[in-house]
Amino acid sequence: MARPQALLSRRTWRRLERNSVRDHEQYLLARLRHLAGHRQAVESVRGSPARRSVSLLMAGYRLVLGGVAPATARELILMAERGDLQLISCGRYGRFWWIAVGNDERQVTLASHVQLLDDGGRPERAPNPPATLRA
């Protein structure tokens, strides 16, 4: 007897994957916009400019940005050392994510990958599975 996964064509699997990724990205963008709408305070910024990644620690959350330009990563770390930062806004620019943080000055950061983790280090989960995966 064939497994259920084998009954779907490659095209169907690709479509399901694209839809799942799209749903996840929409959910993530909505969560980030919610945090930005409340001007979530950024408690600290950690990162490695050489590895092109930065983590913004907020109350209850850690926002990990990957694929960040080294100069931008250094500037974010310096801004965090100078004073309190807030998550101002966020969005998409093609395949990139942009995150704006600031205090007296504003820094917009482009990242190729974004991950929102809860304070226990676990990924944020949607309350319900995406519609594309429901039976």
Image: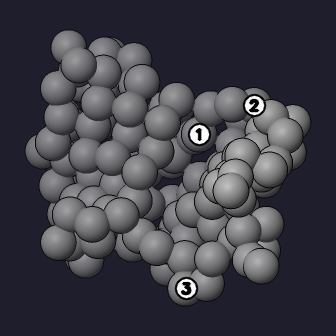
- Point out the residue furthest to the bottom here: 127
Q: Position of residue 109 (x, y in %)?
A: 48, 34
Question: 13 or 128, which is in the foreground?
Answer: 13
Badge 2 amino acid: Gly
Tag 1 secondary structure: strand
Q: Quadrant of residue 134?
A: bottom right
Badge 3 amino acid: Pro
Badge 1 amino acid: Trp
Mark 1 near mark 2, Cβ–Cβ under 8 Å? no
Question: 124 or 52, which is in the foreground?
Answer: 124
Mark 3 near mark 2, Cβ–Cβ under 8 Å? no
Cα gap from disc 1 to disc 2, whole angstroms: 8 Å
Q: Is residue 45 visible?
A: yes
Near mark 1 (Cα within 10 A), the count class, few <14, some 14-19 or many ≥20, is some
Q: Quadrant of residue 85?
A: bottom left
Quadrant of the rendering where the N terminus is positioned: bottom right
Mark 3 or mark 2: whose residue is earlier in sequence: 2
The residue carrying mark 3 is 127
Q: Position of residue 120 (x, y in %)?
A: 17, 72
Question: 96 or 108, which is in the foreground?
Answer: 96
Residue 16 in the figure: left or right of residue 81: right
Q: Which mark is in front, 3 or 1?
A: 3
Q: Position of residue 79 (x, y in %)?
A: 24, 41
Label disc, if present, on residue 97 of the rendered structure: 1
Q: Which mark is in front, 3 or 2?
A: 3
Residue 122 in the figure: left or right of residue 102: left
Quadrant of the rendering where the C terminus is positioned: bottom right
Label disc, if present, on residue 94 of the rendered structure: 2
The image shows residue 16, relative to residue 35, as above or below, that is above
Q: Position of residue 98 (x, y in %)?
A: 57, 40
